[in-house]
């Protein structure tokens, strides 16, 4: 049914019916929320700002994966490898070639996109489980490449020290300053992801996810759209990788690894596949969970002094694994679906239907 | 039989899967603006034939011409762009999309917005969506689907899904419409609705309709001509009343007593 509209609110044009934000107060609320995020450095601690930075960058990577896996239905285990690609391209352009960050970032995104497109080629022949295996290849080949190829430029397994970005004479070398960069890219990436999902491209993506045969017989060039999905997913990964590399200021083949690729998929499931809110909910919940595991660790040791620090390390995957399992069993459509139900219930109250 | 002014012309099409002959030297033509029914017992090769028209199955031999294009040489999505739309025996809808978006997705072939337009969704992509929404709404009106406009089709009952499937094909504004058993699993009332829609589409838009159907009474009522397949071979072709009296058809459906 979609979420019902409040009583007395009618659409008088298709443009209005299609609008995402329908009321002035919703614009104001959104504006205030974003402003509050940008203002975090003024009222939040440094560790909170760092966490928000990390979450923002993770959301971007997961948004890309959502376009590919959530909307287009092509499973990928290579998202972290494309982050590595983007990170290295941006780092090299800024460090070695002396490019400005503002030019290096889009190029890193495009470069990662092209590499993603190449690793997306197997999708033309294989689906599902086999495609996951094929994308896993990216996760082995790209880190191997950074470790072994051009040792004088890529510096082997040691990796690179990455400079802080400089924009308009300002050096973004603290989490507080960096937040401005990561939030801005996040806002743009969210708008673009939303645009994809409501446009011709997004309908083609979902069509080929839901019934690829029908989509092809009804006039969609599947090859083109699969490759575009892989390209876009890798562009998002490239952006996230470049942002993360300049944030951590160090990059090697293990900075973004297979574990991250799997966790991104988990975030997507927890947040909700094929929904624009999914990556946001999923990344926030999982990152907070990991943060909680870190805080919970010392307490855990005081409870069970005999367990070594290793047990504390095990808490993070344990928390993540249990949450993922519970979601798969009880809410496979993720938090985004819950959110929709909640909104519908709020509109319909006090009635249940 | 084929003639020069056929809208769709199928000539000597043979299709085999391993040792099984799905279609054996099948030829027929569909005239512009007629309702041509293809009937035959289960496994006669009707759906295989439709899949050949979409070039989803590639015939071993023979040719299929539609408005001067050889369909056996085109990829399936190009064939759809030429103006051939179809519905599916087991509905093949985009289950995660609403009725509206299923139909909008079918407008795909008439839209021009590229990837960049879609990313920005400003200007062309947006105005195009609004313009095509108009066409889609007319089809929703026509098929009486207003109440399910924003329902996710995965949750709709079978009869309505079949209607959305028809709507999706119509939204492509085809000149040839392939209907693969549009009335399976429907009750009498739903069947009558569907028959009314098919006749209305035919009257209003004048498009050629190729109909595969099991319900003999219905086929005889709405088809202009009928082609009968049995074990992959065309055994009869003609107007409905002729087909009803055709001995080969009666034998195929009822069986022949070969006692001498």
Image (spheres, rainbow, N blue to C red):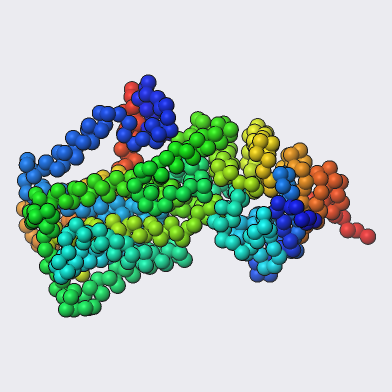
Q: Residue B52, position in %: x, y?
A: 64, 59
Which image quarter holds the N terminus of chain B?
bottom right
Q: Residue B175, position in %: x, y?
A: 64, 47
Q: Which of the pair B177/B109 is nearer the observer?
A: B109
Q: Which of the pair A335/B59 is nearer the observer?
A: B59
Q: Is B48 left or right of A74, judged from the image as shown?
A: right
Q: Does A138 sit above or below residue B238? A: below
Q: Which of the pair A350/A225 is nearer the observer?
A: A225
Q: Is A143 left or right of A117, judged from the image as shown?
A: left
* Residue at x-position 42% and y-position 67%: A122
> Taking the image as drawn, is residue A319 in sight?
no
* Residue at x-position 25% and y-position 28%: A25
* Residue at x-position 50% and y-position 54%: A220
> Taking the image as drawn, is residue B189 in sight?
yes
Q: Residue A113, position in %: x, y?
A: 32, 62
Q: Is A165 left or right of B16, judged from the image as shown?
A: left
Q: Residue A139, position in %: x, y?
A: 29, 68
Q: Which of the pair B254/B197 is nearer the observer?
A: B197
Q: Which image quadrant is residue A7 in?
A: top left
* Residue at x-position 19% and y-position 57%: A102
Q: Which image quadrant is residue B204 in?
A: top right
């Amino acid at each position: 049914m979609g979420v019902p509209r409040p009583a007395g609110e009618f659409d008088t044009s298709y443009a209005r019916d299609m609008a995402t934000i329908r009321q002035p107060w919703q614009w104001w609320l959104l504006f205030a929320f974003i402003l509050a995020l940008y203002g975090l450095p003024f009222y939040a601690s440094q560790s909170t700002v760092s966490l928000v930075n990390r979450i923002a960058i993770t959301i971007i990577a997961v948004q890309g994966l959502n376009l590919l896996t959530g909307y287009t239905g092509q499973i990928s285990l290579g998202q972290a490898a494309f982050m590595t690609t983007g990170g290295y391209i941006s780092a090299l352009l800024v460090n070695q070639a002396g490019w400005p960050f503002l030019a290096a970032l889009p190029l890193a995104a495009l470069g990662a996109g092209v590499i993603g497109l190449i690793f997306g080629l197997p999708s033309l022949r294989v689906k599902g489980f086999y495609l996951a295996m094929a994308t896993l290849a990216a996760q082995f080949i790209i880190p191997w490449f950074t470790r072994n190829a051009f040792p004088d430029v890529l510096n082997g397994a040691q990796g690179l020290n990455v400079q802080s970005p400089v924009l308009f004479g300002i050096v973004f070398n603290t989490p507080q300053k960096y937040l401005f960069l990561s939030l801005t890219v996040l806002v743009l990436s969210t708008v673009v992801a939303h645009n994809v999902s409501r446009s011709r491209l997004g309908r083609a993506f979902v069509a080929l996810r839901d019934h690829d045969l029908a989509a092809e017989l009804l006039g969609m060039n599947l090859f083109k759209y699969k490759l575009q999905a892989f390209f876009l997913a890798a562009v998002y990964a490239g952006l996230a990788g470049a942002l993360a590399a300049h944030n951590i200021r160090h990059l090697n083949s293990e900075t973004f690894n297979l574990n991250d690729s799997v966790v991104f998929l988990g975030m997507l499931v927890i947040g909700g596949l094929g929904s624009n809110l999914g990556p946001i909910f999923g990344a926030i919940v999982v990152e907070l969970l990991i943060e909680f595991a870190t805080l919970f660790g010392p307490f855990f040791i005081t409870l069970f002094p005999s367990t070594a620090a290793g047990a504390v390390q095990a808490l993070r995957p344990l928390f993540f694994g249990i949450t993922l399992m519970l979601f798969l069993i009880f809410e496979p459509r993720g938090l985004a679906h819950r959110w929709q139900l909640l909104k519908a219930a709020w509109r319909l109250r006090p009635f249940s239907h | 039989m084929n003639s020069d002014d056929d809208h769709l012309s199928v000539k000597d099409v043979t299709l085999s899967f391993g040792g099984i002959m799905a279609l054996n030297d099948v030829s027929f033509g569909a005239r512009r603006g007629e309702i041509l029914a293809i009937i035959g017992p289960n496994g006669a090769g009707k759906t295989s034939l439709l899949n050949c028209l979409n070039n989803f199955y590639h015939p071993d031999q023979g040719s299929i011409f539609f408005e001067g294009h050889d369909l056996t040489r085109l990829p399936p999505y190009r064939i759809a762009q030429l103006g051939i739309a179809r519905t599916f025996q087991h509905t093949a809808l985009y289950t995660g999309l609403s009725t509206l978006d299923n139909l909008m997705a079918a407008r795909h072939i008439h839209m021009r917005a590229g990837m960049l337009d879609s990313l920005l969704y400003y200007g062309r992509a947006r105005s195009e969506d609004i313009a095509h929404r108009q066409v889609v709404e007319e089809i929703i009106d026509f098929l009486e689907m207003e109440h399910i406009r924003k329902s996710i089709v995965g949750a709709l009952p079978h009869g309505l899904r079949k209607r959305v499937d028809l709507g999706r094909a119509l939204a492509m504004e085809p000149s040839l419409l392939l209907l693969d058993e549009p009335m399976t699993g429907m009750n009498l009332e739903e069947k009558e609705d569907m028959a009314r829609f098919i006749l209305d589409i035919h009257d209003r838009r004048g498009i050629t309709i190729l109909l595969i159907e099991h319900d003999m009474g219905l086929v005889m009522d709405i088809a202009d001509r009928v082609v009968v397949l049995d074990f992959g071979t065309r055994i009869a072709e003609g107007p409905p009343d002729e087909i009803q009296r055709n001995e080969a058809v009666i034998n195929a459906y009822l069986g022949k007593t070969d006692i001498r």
